[in-house]
Image (cartoon, rainbow, N blue to C red):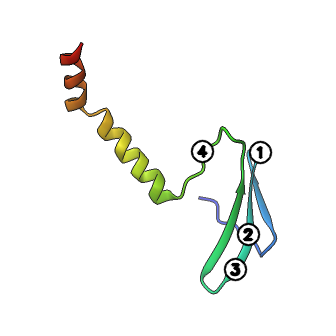
Amino acid sequence: MLALTRKKGESIVVNNDIEISILDIRGEQVKVGISAPKDVPVYRKEVHLQIQKENEAAVSLDNVDMLKNIL
């Protein structure tokens, strides 16, 4: 993991097309802005983990067996 220090108004560029900006700092909260191409999904980690969990459930062996029975 790369750890960088940024101040309000400063940014980080990832892969030439993703910009992460520090918009505001209040106490222990940091407001972050992310500019990325539309084809790049950007999620909060807890949302990303939930999506992964639901995707894994959708392709579970039980669901595969159900599909075989339908076909």
- How far apart are labels 1 and 2 at the CA level? 17 Å
Q: Position of residue 59 (x, y in %)?
A: 31, 32
The type of residue carrying mark 4 is: Pro
Mark 2 element type: strand
- Residue at the image point whose x is 60% and y is 45% from the top: 41
> Which residue is outermost to the right?
9
Mark 3 element type: strand
- Residue at the image point whose x is 20% and y is 25% from the top: 66
Q: Position of residue 37 (x, y in %)?
A: 72, 42
- How far apart are labels 2 and 4 at the CA level? 19 Å
Q: Position of residue 14 (x, y in %)?
A: 73, 50
- Residue at the image point whose x is 72% and y is 76% from the top: 24
Whichever of labels 4 and 1 marks the residue nearer the N terminus, that label is 1
The type of residue carrying mark 3 is: Ile
Report the residue marked by disc 3.
25
Q: Is residue 41 above or below residue 32?
A: above
Whichever of labels 1 and 3 marks the residue nearer the N terminus, that label is 1
The type of residue carrying mark 1 is: Asp
Q: Residues within 10 Å of mark 1 (few under 14, many from 20)?
A: few
Q: Is residue 14 above or below residue 23?
A: above
Report the residue marked by disc 4.
41
Examine the image and state in which quarter residue 63 appears: top left
> Which residue is outermost to the top?
71
Asked if labels 3 and 2 touch by Cβ distance under 8 angstroms, the answer is yes
Tell me the number on the disc at residue 17.
Answer: 1
- How far apart are labels 4 and 1 at the CA level? 13 Å
Asked if labels 4 and 2 touch by Cβ distance under 8 angstroms, the answer is no
28 relative to 49 in the view: left or right: right
Q: Is residue 67 above or below residue 30?
A: above
Examine the image and state in which quarter residue 60 appears: top left
**Nearer-the-camera pick, 68 or 13:** 68
Tell me the number on the disc at residue 22.
Answer: 2
